Image (cartoon, rainbow, N blue to C red):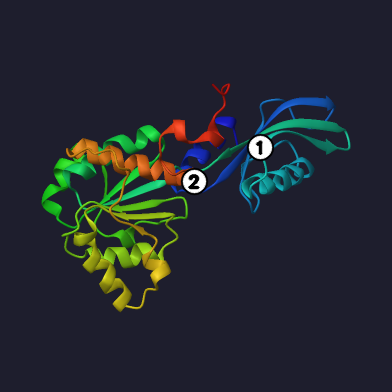
């Protein structure tokens, strides 16, 4: 398999939201059966495509790839062979986290527009198909139900219409998923009845407490793009474990000289 074919397999795996590691031979010592530029694609389980020249080198590469896929730092490693050794560069490729946007509202359109700019894949969930053509023309990824979307711990779910039909069912699915962030747009007065009914359905206070409502940072904006900016800023802050307050108040993050 050529290097181009390995890269095509890499893109295909990312398209299926898989985490993979690409190993590229960059140098050799001695006479191993490998030349610089050869590639091997692997995941935490084993090789997926390509080769570094022989099964011995591939097994050694798979062990390193498994470690990187499980959290070890990528970078340069040496792989030993009876005829020499190979230096390989390991790169980790992970699918972008998903921002799952419930209801195709004006705020949702701005969220979907901006999410890719900050590294998120946006998916708009709405079963009201009369807007499909409009949203599809805008390049938005669509789903009819949240259950059609695979949600991981890196993903976020945001409801942009507290009056949407089926909102509670969608929130139930979000809470049962591994989503690292769940939020509902609107005041506590509007979201409160939904949260109460989730408790009545058996969700604990801790589970319901996962739902951020009102969602977003307090920027004071009122227009659709301003509200979307507030929500997206809150999602990004959550991703990095930050409060979202002003930088001048985050003394632990201060990297310059103290005045």
Counting from the top left corner in percent of width and height, residue 76 is at: 72, 31
In the rendered image, the vertical position of residue 17 relative to residue 37, given as above or below: below
Q: Which quadrant of the rendered structure holds the N terminus? A: top right
Quadrant assignment, res 139 = top left
Task: Measure the C-alpha gap from mark 1 to mark 2.
Answer: 23 Å
Is residue 84 visible to us here?
yes
How many residues crowd mark 2 within 10 Å: few (<14), some (14–19), many (20+)? few
Residue in the image at 45% along x and 49% along y? 16
Task: Answer above or below: position of 41 versus 169.
Answer: above
Name the secondary structure under disc 1.
loop
Residue 131 x/y as whole percent: 13, 48
Mark linked to residue 241: 2
Estimate the x, y position of residue 27 in percent, counting from the top left: 75, 24
Residue plotted at (45% across, 60% down) = 178
Residue 197 placement (x, y as % from top left)? 26, 73
Q: Quadrant of the C terminus?
A: top right
Which residue carries the number 1 mark? Answer: 74
Tell me the quarter of the picture where residue 78 sits: top right
Quadrant assignment, res 109 = top left
Look at the numbered disc 2 and give the secondary structure of its residue: loop
């Amino acid at each position: 398999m050529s290097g181009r074919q390995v890269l095509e397999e890499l893109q295909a795996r990312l398209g299926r939201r898989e985490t993979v590691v690409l190993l590229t031979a960059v140098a050799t010592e001695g006479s191993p059966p490998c030349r610089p530029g050869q590639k091997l694609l692997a995941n935490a389980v084993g090789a997926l495509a390509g080769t570094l020249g022989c099964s011995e080198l591939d097994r050694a590469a798979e062990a390193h790839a498994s470690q990187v896929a499980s959290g070890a730092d990528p970078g340069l490693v040496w792989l030993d062979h009876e005829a020499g050794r190979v230096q390989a560069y390991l790169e980790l490729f992970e699918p972008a986290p998903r921002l799952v946007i419930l209801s195709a509202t004006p705020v949702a359109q701005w969220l979907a527009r901006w999410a890719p700019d900050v590294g998120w894949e946006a998916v708009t969930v709405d079963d009201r198909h009369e807007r499909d053509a409009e949203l599809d023309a805008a390049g938005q990824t669509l789903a009819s139900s949240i259950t059609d979307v695979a949600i991981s711990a890196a993903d976020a779910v945001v409801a942009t219409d507290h009056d949407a039909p089926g909102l509670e069912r969608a929130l139930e699915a979000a809470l049962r998923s591994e989503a690292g962030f769940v939020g509902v747009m609107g005041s506590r007065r509007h979201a409160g009845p939904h949260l109460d009914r989730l408790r009545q359905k058996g969700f604990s206070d801790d589970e319901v407490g996962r739902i951020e409502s009102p969602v977003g940072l307090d920027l004071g904006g009122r227009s659709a793009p301003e509200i979307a900016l507030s929500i997206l800023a809150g999602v990004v802050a959550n991703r990095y474990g930050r409060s979202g307050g002003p930088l001048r108040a985050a003394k632990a993050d201060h990297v310059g000289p103290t005045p």
